[in-house]
Amino acid sequence: MTGQQERPRFHLLGAILRVVSTLAILGFAAWGAVALFYQASGPSPVRLAAAALWVVVSLAVLIAYLRWRSRLAALIYPVMIAALLFWWGAIPASNNRDWADEVGQMTAGVVNGPEVTLANVRNFDWRTSTDYTVRWENRTYDLDKLATVDLLLSYWSSPAIAHTLISFGFEDGSFVTFSVEIRKERHESFSEIGGFFKEFETSVIAADERDIVKVRTNIRKEDVYLYRINMKKPAMRSLFMAYVDEANGLVETPRFYSTITSNCTTIVFAMVSRIVPGLPIDYRLLFSGYLPAYIVDVNGFMPGLTLEQLRAGGAISARAQAADTAPDFSRRIRDDVPGIAPLTQP
């Protein structure tokens, strides 16, 4: 009687094992194919052939495993997976590639007391997406005169996805804006899928606000929103230095960009968490278009304003397009933004 009870249990466990193994093989077949397509050496036809070969071998192993209960297939495929993962882990990030102009230099900072000198602050003059004047400048900022922190979110497709920028304002009315971006090569363009498969390195760009906002509002025609962050000066200073540390770290040790774990919003969250411990993890950190609602929940905006008021008043694209080359660009894009007092013209 006991043997009869154990036999169905054994068959059930065997069936579960086959289902799990099948899903694992199919999963690694798909992941390995995309990984090989993005990272195998050679031109696109060679990479496509490598991806196709991986899929064919994976499916052959799966058929052998399911149809003939092949122990050899059960032993060979884990070895194949281990070899693939070893190759994947050995792919190095690099700072030496033929970079696109807008990420051609790397920001780095040198601290001297309250002053921080940033090398390679981007200050392009954008006329179109392909017609621009390249300028990289060294600028010095006095953190004792740091006055404001603003969040900018730039939307280009879905309301769930936005690019995150942080702009630091100083008492003289000047601004510097930090952006964590993909560091793409000259022939590359942004790809969410590529961001999962080591297609891009990570770059911290420090830029003149006119450059980095105007390219989004005036050139790419993205919808950009500006929000004043409710932050005390020691926290502002700490956040600024967190960007400098991140930029310097990437100069020393390049790192791949990740669509999920190392993007423009998750890195900002990691920085702010150093200043305000205990911030809750939330899905809106991944779906960055919804970030303002999260910041409202943690009391990060100026008090006394609803999210609807902040969003309506913070829509700056039309103001940026009107300001264009005006010398007081930063002041004009902040006109009527809730929680912001009139700025001194630089």
Image (cartoon, grey):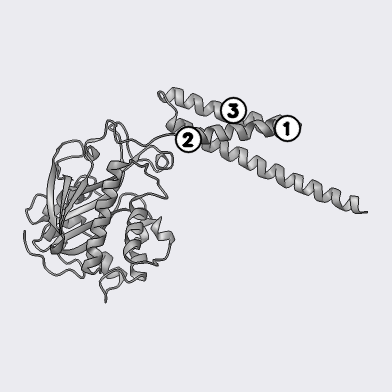
Residue 116: tell me if it is visible: yes
Q: Are marks 3 and 2 in contact (CB under 8 Å)?
A: no
65 to 140, vertically: above or below? above
The residues tagged by marks 3 and 2 sit, at their Cα atoms, a distance apart of: 20 Å
Q: Position of residue 246 (x, y in %)?
A: 29, 50
Dot in front, 3 or 2: 2
Q: Which residue is mark 3?
A: 56
Q: Choose top left, top right, bottom left or bottom right for residue 159.
A: bottom left
The residues tagged by marks 2 and 1 sit, at their Cα atoms, a distance apart of: 26 Å
Residue 71's disc is 1
Dot in front, 3 or 1: 1
- As drawn, which residue projects farthest toward the front? 113
The residues tagged by marks 3 and 1 sit, at their Cα atoms, a distance apart of: 19 Å
Q: Position of residue 174 (x, y in %)?
A: 11, 57
- Could you tell which of marks 2 and 1 lies nearer the N-terminus? 1
Quadrant where the C terminus sits is bottom left
Q: Which residue is mark 2?
A: 88
> Callout 3, which amino acid?
Val
Q: In this view of the protein, which residue sits in the foreground, 218 or 230?
A: 230
- As drawn, which residue projects farthest toward the bottom? 304
> Callout 2, which amino acid?
Trp
| Label 2 secondary element | helix
| Label 1 secondary element | helix
* Left or right: residue 13 compared with residue 87: right
